[in-house]
Amino acid sequence: MQRIGVFVCWCGSNIAATVDVDAVVEAVKNEPGVCFAKNYQYMCSEAGQALIKDAIKEHNLTGIVVCSCSPRMHEATFRKTAEQAGLNPYMVEIANIREHCSWIHKDMKEATEKAVILARAAIAKVNLNAPLQAGESAVTKRALVIGGGIAGLQSAIDIADAGYPVDIVEKSPTIGGKMAQLDKTFPTLDCAACILTPKMVEAAQHPNITLYTYSEVEEVKGFVGNFNVKIKKKARFVDSTKCTGCAVCTAKCPSRKGGNEFNCNLDTRGAVYIPFAQAVPNVATIDTERCIHFKTGKCGICQKVCSAGAIDFEQKDEFIEEKYGAIVVATGFEILDVTKFDEFQYTKHPDVVTSLELERIMNAAGPTKGTLLRMSNKEHPHDIVFIQCVGSRGNTCRDKTYCSKICCMYTAKHAMLIREKYPDVNVHVFYIDVRTPGKNFDEFYRRAVEQYNVDYIKGMVGKVWEKENGRLAVQGVDLISNRRIMLETDMVVLAAAIQPSKGVRNIATMLTASIDTNDFLTEAHPKLRPVESPTAGVFLSGVCQGPKDIPETVSQAGAAAVKVVGLLAKDKLVTNPCTATPNELMCNGCSSCARVCPYGAIDYVEKEVNDHGKREVRRLATVNSALCQGCGACTVACPSGAMDLKGFSNRQIMAEVDAICR
Amino acid sequence: MQKTAGLIKKRALELLADGTVTKVLGWEEGDFIYDVTPAFFDKETIDSLVFSSFCGSNLSKYLIKACKEQTEGKILVFLKPCDTFSFNQLLTEHRIDREKVYVVGVECKGMLDIEKIKALGINGVTKVIDNGESLNIKTIYGEKTCERSEVLLEKCTTCKSKELVVFDEVLGEKAENENSQDRFAQVAALEAMTTEERYAFWQGELSKCIRCNACRNVCPACSCMKCVFDNIQSGVASKSNADTFEEKMFHIIRAFHVAGRCTDCGECSRVCPQGIPLHLLNRKFIKDINELYGDYQAGEEAGSRAPLVNFTFDDAEPSVIHERGNS
């Protein structure tokens, strides 16, 4: 029989205002095994912990229940407290009477009743608890960064500078990401390429960084400190060790009809291409969907013109397997598909463009060589209308509910740059709110309005249509003067919402990292652990976690790197002792458990068992406790109930349910 | 049918004689010709082996124990198409050893239900001549005839497949599966009921249960070393009932335990002395799995991964399943 102490925390008024803590203490005193119960204002305080330690010693307690906040907050605290008093830390159970009770209830009577029930369940569990010993596992001192945009590059460089090897896996043929497509960056208006390319070069030349471009993560196994990752290096059909990046092949390629993704499909590229001049690595890639050789077996011009003999039509996908201690997800974002917003004529009129397309139009390496031109007739525009929040902050199914955060600033930037370079162009901006928190951000926006006379109109655009003269009519509303507005313009620029890259769902699934309803990766704690995923060993960098601009991305990338370095600096990690164990006499050897185990921790052996005097050889499951992470998937998959989880045994869980239903 | 019976006997004798097998798993007659039960035979007892239109029982499960005991040589087993699914599922779960079994697939046109024959007023049956379409039945009260389709076992009226999915050799003539009814029609009818109606339906059916455990004992998926209902640690064993409907827990837990593993062989309902349509519980799971994860039949392919213990990127989102459960 256990000797259990129950400690009820007030959490100031967080719990005590809704739960009658005295009543909880009275109610639990008569529960089986309980020989001490007390409440206290702050159980997590030094004094509160001392109270627990004293009670353990004085009453020879064998187990304790702390009725307090979520175990995610203070389970570790109270386990240490118990350990200091000589108790096994796994003889501690937390009844969450704050998040699960006081915070969500208003009625004191009901909340108190529920708190008693939750305490009772925890007591029932402790009655069946057994001391557990944590083990140790080694840490592979190598990190993987998924995504080679500014977030991934910064994280990788910071980890590499700390002395740990890092691999970057980038799905496109070059690193650089979305930032490489930008023209200038707010609020300082320095050229994106000028500040990004040094980072790209640094990553490429860093002795601790290995780049896997045109590659994708294929499979992830293992756990924190010991991930096994399979990387697919897609065939470029160009030998990157021979290619000099001279770009002769790209110029001679006769298949030129397909769009150039780097320029948002505003111009075309060859089937063999180098995405942009500063691409890293500066190596050509053959797009097999467009290549005449791959489609018809003819052509082969690139092979003939390549003086380095780098074109290799026979190249195959390559698979690399590597071990990592930590993984940084930096998969970034993409622009929302605005074809659903056809009231703005995006699919119908070439002069309606997204902001990213405008970046390319304004960029010297873009389709117009940096001259602002209408895409319909290549003429100079005289009026431009910007529409903010296209797809952001909406509540219909085509919208995202969140604010994309960067649009206010880049629209101000576009407006200012256009007015600076082409003072004859009238610029109008339709907005819901202008949101410019951030260092020097509001000053930047005010400069656009006050110094450059950009016409900001509070209100939204209802529709856009083409007039007979080829220009665009914009019908909107001005909420300040409360009147309808009709404008005639040459171009319309849509500040489209940003959303996580499509591939992130697969990556999150492989990593068992959670994502929210918008597919942004979830943090372990939104305030206190913002760069960690709830999955140990997985860290978040950049927009994959939520919309953010470059300065914020770089800060977060550095923060993620520090967390990775902190992990890799350890030689051993303490493992969770709550691992699965099969009951050999009940195991059928059916493999159900091995099939659902995400960590590959379950194996089978032919073993002789003595089943109540009957000796026979059976196929039995065995768990490698160094690999087992205690997720419990096997315990529910086991048809006979042979698989059990230490610390969360079937009996303990049934006892909790029974205690709740009593 | 009579011809197939002859072939089966002949093959059993041959395979025993040439040493391919040392043991035969088949059927033997009881006191009445329709009273056929599974049995093991060797060279001495093989004469009692029979095959008739009353051989509805699925022999696969008997191989679990037999494989363990078999130290040398193979066991010959006769499996009808639906039984081969159970055989495959047991292979998937490593419960039987393929190397120790010689499978003779027996083509099947559906087996007969003596209760249905009796319900037609045909009693005292002494012989059935089955020409594949109609039956000529000799009774102690004289000769009677009836259509085969009128007296098929319930599980055979909704036959899922006439394909033998695993075999070493095949006997008999391949049958077509044209007259079989939609096996999910009854499930769909239950789904169409209101919650109250459905509850009343199952309350009516499951209250009849006498907990004889026949369904569990015959079920090829119920092959645990120790069944949770016999495990005193599980907290559900040896509990007395507070009311007649409490056996619902037994049946619902059992349905969950075999979900994704049930081959829909229909043995549970066939052996139920109370006539409870237990197969409908399992079939509901099969229908749900098909609709949520794409068509899957346990046992169709040895070693296949059932959707419930597998993960693919196009799996239905939990929210979809949740919403469906609420509708």
Image: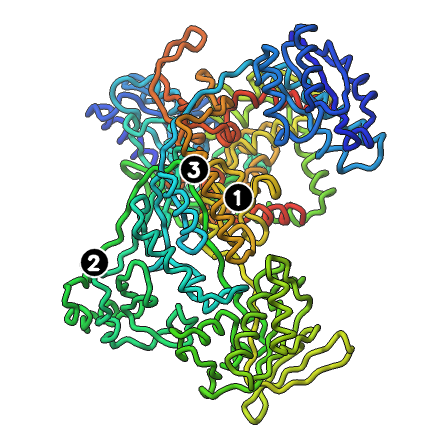
Q: Is residue B140 visible to the viewer in this orientation of the structure? A: no
Q: Which tag, 3 or 2, sits closer to the chain's start? A: 2
Q: Is residue A202 visible to the viewer in this orientation of the structure? A: yes
Secondary element type, mark 3 = helix
How many neighbours does mark 1 have within 10 angstroms: few (below 14), some (14-19), or many (20 or more)?
Answer: many
- In this rendering, position of residue B113 left or right of residue B102: right
* Chain letter of disc 2 in the image: A
* Chain letter of disc 1 in the image: A
Question: Disc 3 and disc 2: Cα gap in Å?
Answer: 34 Å
| x, y percent for residue B146 | 51, 43
Amino acid type, residue under disc 1 in the picture = Val
Circle 1 is placed at which residue position? Answer: A531
Q: Which tag, 2 or 1, sits closer to the chain's start? A: 2
Question: Disc 2 and disc 1: Cα gap in Å?
Answer: 37 Å
- Give the answer, above or below, for where B314 lies relative to A653: below
Residue under disc 2 on the same chain as residue under disc 1: yes
- Give the answer, above or below, for where B80 lies relative to A334: above
- Give the answer, above or below, for where A265 lies relative to B243: below
| Location of residue B231 (image quadrant) | top right
Amino acid type, residue under disc 2 in the picture = Asp
Q: Which tag, 3 or 1, sits closer to the chain's start? A: 1
